[in-house]
Amino acid sequence: MTTIRLTAAQALVRWLCAQYVVVDGAEVPYFAGAWAIFGHGNVAAMGEALYAARDALPTFRAHNEQGMAHAAVAYAKQMRRRRAMVCTTSIGPGATNLVTAAALAHVNRLPVLFVPGDVYASRRPDPVLQQVEDFGDGTVSANDCFRPVSRWFDRIVRPEQLLDALPKVLATLLDPANCGPVTLAFCQDVQAEAFDYPLSFFERRIWTQRRPPADPRELDALEAALRVAKRPLLVSGGGVLYSQAETALAVLAEATGLPVAETQAGKGALPWTHPCALGSIGVTGSSAANAMAQEADLVVGIGTRLQDFTTGSRSLFEGKRLFQVNVQSFDAHKHGATAVVGDALTVVEALRERLQGWRVAGEVVERDRTAVVAWNADVVVATSGEAGKALPSDAQVIGAVQGSFGDDVVVVCAAGGLPGELHKLWRTARPGGYHLEYGYSCMGYEIAGGVGVKMAEPQREVVVMVGDGSYLMLNSELATSVMLGLKLVVVLLDNRGYGCINRLQQATGSPGFNNLLADARHAALPDIDFAAHARSLGALAEHVATLGELQAALQRARAAERSTVVVIDTDPLKTTEAGGWWWDVAVPEVSDRPEVNAARRDYEQRVRMKRDLS
């Protein structure tokens, strides 16, 4: 057996470079690059290995470990899980800064490889700098925080362990059912240790996308249920996009008249102009989709994990016959659904063949289309605004942004009130044009996520919509976008605090408290100049006062050569009233405040209504 002597870090990097996939007919490396912030736990061995492979596996420098991980996750999401990236850090805070992003990737079923440095396996210098010591377990390190937020976790304490561990890494990252983050906690002394690895271990390998078909008996049951249903509804989730099933879904819907509603992750599976598209569903849903869900006698989820915003905290689909098409059995059996376990594309194509000649009743299709026309009129009202209005709503800013970009733009957002408004109001014309991280709803994802999206699709314009709260949490990757030449247009909506949670707080009977800056404990209110801050990070930036000025600024931003931030003050209280559904937010059962008690009575009534529906 021919061998090659390498350090464990060199072997890891060399193996990563040899893994390939086929994307759009071309063989490409599965790992598009490595994000690295070096420290004493990875700078020597991992740094040396990445330097040697810098052409085959480009290394990108970020400013915050969580930010670079968000960029890696966003890249994988925009690539529809077909490619991924690596993130490596030192031990200690560098590693634990990744944990939030790991949880985000885990919730959203997105692939990313984390390689945080770890303590010395030999324990020679224990406790090494930044080492977390457990008083009752000598095997624990800070990286054990990754265990509950990793699909696969391993700690490399000997160099030869890579021979067993690395194939499991790719098997997890590329598995359509178990896809999610993988963590290889890499002991820093082991990174530098050498071993005689079989040369065959580093041979180029092409991995293929697995498409498990559904059991024919499960398809029989779904076909039979659809054929007898009077008001069936399809709910498209992120799995439709990850399976590249959007074209097949459009063909199925058009051939059968089946109406399609979309989750946050599934938005864009159908263009908003498709005759069967009802728009968003659930708590942030369109009136057309939610009305259809109320009337439906059969709901078929395709590639959705049925998060509470989709189901209206399990109230929207209560009493309905529910089927769940999902490649992951865990998701397919949720809410007592009849499971159809299989790849979304293969199931949709099978349904198209099985349902030939069958259509939803014409009067039902016509009612849906009438409801969509009414909803589209509501969208126009919500997103329109006078050019001179001082404090526009989020919806009006969305309208101005939508009108300033073409159909090929990608909008990126994550947390606060904007995701709800975007889910309702953004009109997605092409797949991949709507990139929302709403599984973990992670503040601070937006700008870093925009970097990852631009890496995945550099030919498309990327507009990041972010609130002032999220911007203040994590803005450093704006400098990264400038440094890497990844141009973003960032629209920063300043409502002077956490406006979304302030509205929720007041809706549950409490006064405004600790959310808006004016309602928080302060000696003086900060006068934050976001445009000046963005310029200090290397971006172009300007502050505008009106919607008309915003539209003009966006045209300048589109013509600019580097990332540009446009700041506009917005109304923290106004939100779109059209559409939507109940969300279960528990209100205190007892309180000295009559407003809270009134909110509790309303909450209990809504809970009873939910039970009555079942």
Image (cartoon, rainbow, N blue to C red):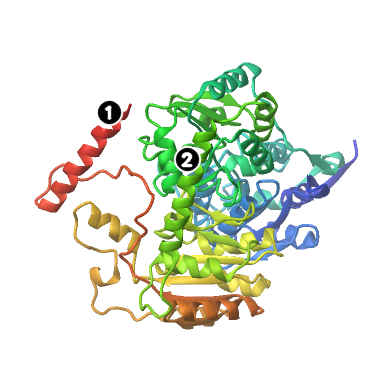
Q: Amino acid under label 2?
A: Arg
Q: Which residue is mark 1?
A: 612
Give the secondary structure at mark 2. helix
Residue drawn 81% across and 41% down?
206
**Amino acid of disc 1:** Asp
In front here: 119 or 375? Answer: 375
Query: Furthest residue to the front?
Result: 363
Q: Is residue 244 visible to us here?
A: yes
- Between marks 2 and 1 in the image, the one whose residue lies nearer the viewer: 2
| Residue underneath mark 2 | 367
Classify 10 Å Cα crowding around label 2: few (below 14), some (14-19), many (20 and above): few
Q: Is residue 148 visible?
A: no
Instruction: Give the vertical position of 137 relative to 299 (above or below).
Output: below
Q: Nearer the viewer, residue 290 or 46?
A: 290
Taking the image as shown, residue 268 lies to the left or right of residue 83, namely left
The one of 371 and 386 positioned closer to us in this rendering: 371
Q: Residue 526: percent from the left, percent from the top?
A: 32, 79
Query: Vertically, is 12 above or below 392?
Result: above
Residue drawn at point x = 24 percent, y = 33 percent:
608
Secondary structure, mark 1, is helix
- The quadrant the C terminus occupies is top left
- Give the percent coordinates (x, y) of residue 273: 59, 52
> Is residue 66 found left or right of 209 in the rendered image?
left
Q: Tell me which corner region of the image, top left, top right, bottom left or bottom right, holds residue 485.
A: bottom right
**First reached walking from the N terminus: tag 2 or tag 1:** 2
Residue 541: x %, y % from top left: 53, 81
Mark 1 Cα shell of 10 Å, populated few (<14), some (14-19), many (≥20)? few
Rendered image: mark on residue 359: none
Q: Residue visible at 40% across and 43% down?
A: 135
Tell me the quadrant of the picture where the N terminus can be found.
Answer: top right
Find residue 610 and report its horizontal and vertical position in percent.
Answer: 30, 33
Gap between marks 2 and 1 measured at Cα: 26 Å
